[in-house]
Image (cartoon, rainbow, N blue to C red):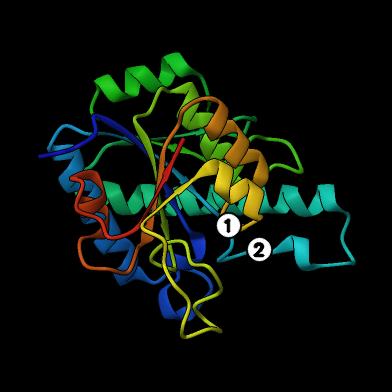
Amino acid sequence: MAAYKRVLLKLSGEALSGDKKSGFDEATCKNTALQIKEIVDNHTEVAIVIGGGNFWRGRTSENIDRTKADQIGMLATVMNCIYMSEILRSVGVNTVIMTPFECGSFTTLFSKDGVMQAFNEGRVVFFAGGTGHPYFSTDTATALRAIEIEADVILAAKAVDGVYDSDPKTNPDAVRYDTLSFAEIVDGKLGVIDLAASVLCMENNMPMLIFGLDEKDSIVNAVTGRSKGTVITV
């Protein structure tokens, strides 16, 4: 039985690329879609934000203006949402993609009323294009949209299975936290999510669960309260 009625699922673009580290791994995306279908069929309302890291890491470039780099990143998230939207439709889930800016006929403009109507119609809602402004990451867009639509929780599916005291890729003795507070993340500068997103969640009582996308049934387990990830409290 679902532990949440309405969730905002944040998918890591890098996690969707699987071992390829860029683009899409179709098997990973199909498995993700099937899990989303399962929770939707069990009457959980789902909104989704996808990062753009499988296409673009503009902040690492010194040759591109930050504003332009962030705009490219916004378009990377639009591509990711269009792709995952189609994968979801292929398994029988109706979707809508919303952006904070005009994007031709590819998407519709974000509005809370539009989101609520989509939920009433049983659709999964994708929030593409971040906040529509530079200097705000998809973490911040995730926090903002989750608060706006009054989600019960943010479920952050990443390439790692939680928050560690150090980088588990470089430190085999890194210890994973079962629970943390947003204040501890901010004070410890842990960097697992952006500072702006942490403060938004903290000020608006929006909890978060960070877990590994590649674990078996990870999304279903997150929604049903059986995840082994890190719970971030307010």
Task: Say which element carries label 2.
Answer: loop
At horizontal 63% and vertical 47% (from top left) the residue drawn is: 186
The amino acid type, in three-letter code, at marker 2 is: Trp
The residue most toward the left is 1
Dot 1, crowdedness within 10 Å: few (<14), some or many (≥20)?
A: many
Task: Say which element carries label 1.
Answer: loop
Q: Which residue is mark 2?
A: 56
At horizontal 77% and vertical 67% (from top left) the residue drawn is: 60
Residue 178, given in percent of the width and then of the height, sits at 36, 57
The residue most toward the top is 113
Relative to 200, residue 128 above or below: below
Q: Looking at this view, is 44 or 166 the one in front?
A: 166
Dot 2, crowdedness within 10 Å: few (<14), some or many (≥20)?
A: many
Q: Quarter of the image holding residue 198?
A: top right
Residue 149, given in percent of the width and then of the height, sits at 43, 23
Q: Looking at this view, is 82 or 148 the one in front?
A: 148
Relative to 194, residue 141 above or below: above
Q: Is residue 217 visible?
A: yes
At horizontal 21% and vertical 34% (from top left) the residue drawn is: 44
Contact? badges 2 and 1 (CB < 8 Å): yes
| C-alpha span from label 2 to label 1 | 6 Å
Q: Quarter of the image holding residue 5?
A: top left
The quarter of the rendered structure image containing the N terminus is top left
Q: Is residue 105 visible?
A: no
Q: How many marks?
A: 2
Q: Looking at this view, is 86 or 51 the one in front?
A: 51
Q: Looking at this view, is 218 or 50 the one in front?
A: 218
| Dot label at residue 52 | 1
At horizontal 19% and vertical 53% (from top left) the residue drawn is: 226
Residue 90, given in percent of the width and then of the height, sits at 25, 52
The amino acid type, in three-letter code, at marker 1 is: Gly
